[in-house]
């Protein structure tokens, strides 16, 4: 970004002269071109840091492809039965919560939209659908105009966190999928910032 004389000098008098020249149609051309070149240079510098929209879309598509495979592998790997036995009290307590009970209905509905029938919420796939249902409720509650209340929202967020803690312990492949997704999201998040 090549600065103008007034920008380099950092002189108020030259800055005023530059503004005066910019406001006259017969003298504004060179300054407008200089400002346009500066703007283009800044946009190029930002694109070098953040990436182009096409680059971001390619990264997001790659994340989606790898995540789909990772989560499919996690569902296929299933649950570590020994760990599930060790966490049985926590799992039973979690599954009795009202927020999980309502999430089951939402999860069934979401799965039905993809022609899937959910019967086993004790499986990795069933718990993943519960997580999606809780995400759906949390997202709806956080949008403007929701009347769910702070306490109910906090309960939903806590239940989701507890579900994720249990799920990642009883299904190590699911934790790996989540970790991989988070790693792949860093570049996208940095680009957004």
Image (tube, grey):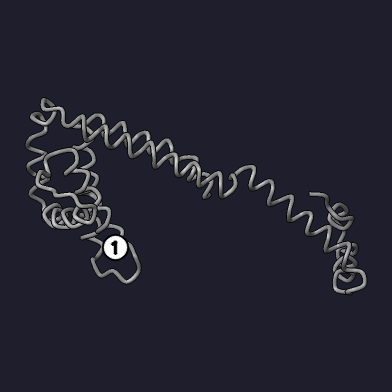
Residue pushed farthest bottom? Answer: 24
Residue pushed farthest front? Answer: 115
Image: 18 above or below 87: below
Q: Nearer the viewer, residue 136 or 6?
A: 136
Indicate the position of residue 10 as horizontal and vertical percent values.
84, 55
Q: What's the residue at 18%, 53% (across, down)? A: 107
Q: What's the residue at 24%, 29% (across, down)? A: 172
Q: Residues within 10 Å of mark 1 (few under 14, many from 20)?
A: some
Residue pushed farthest right? Answer: 26
Image check: 187 left or right of 39?
left
SS category of the residue bearing label 1: helix
- Splitting the image into 4 quarters, where does residue 120 fall? top left
Image check: 109 left or right of 44?
left
Question: Which residue position is annotated with label 1?
Answer: 140
Image: 174 above or below 45: above
Indicate the position of residue 94 as horizontal and vertical percent values.
12, 45
Q: What's the residue at 28%, 69% (across, down)? A: 146
Indicate the position of residue 157 as horizontal and vertical percent values.
25, 52
Image: 90 above or below 42: above
Q: Nearer the viewer, residue 128 or 113?
A: 113
Residue pushed farthest top? Answer: 82
């Amino acid at each position: 970004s090549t600065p103008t004389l007034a920008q380099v000098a950092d002189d108020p008098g030259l800055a005023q002269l530059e503004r005066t020249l910019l406001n006259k149609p017969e003298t504004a051309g060179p300054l407008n071109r200089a400002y346009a070149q500066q703007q283009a240079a800044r946009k190029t510098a930002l694109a070098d840091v953040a990436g182009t929209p096409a680059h971001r879309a390619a990264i997001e598509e790659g994340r989606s492809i790898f995540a789909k495979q990772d989560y499919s592998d996690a569902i296929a790997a299933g649950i570590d039965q020994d760990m599930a036995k060790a966490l049985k009290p926590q799992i039973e307590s979690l599954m009795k919560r009202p927020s999980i009970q309502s999430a089951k209905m939402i999860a069934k509905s979401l799965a039905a939209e993809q022609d899937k029938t959910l019967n086993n919420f004790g499986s990795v796939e069933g718990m993943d659908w519960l997580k999606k249902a809780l995400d759906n409720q949390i997202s709806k509650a956080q949008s403007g105009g929701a009347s769910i209340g702070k306490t109910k929202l906090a309960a939903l967020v806590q239940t989701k966190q507890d579900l994720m803690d249990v799920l990642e312990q009883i299904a190590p492949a699911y934790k790996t999928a989540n970790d991989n997704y988070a790693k792949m999201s860093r570049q996208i998040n940095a680009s957004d910032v």
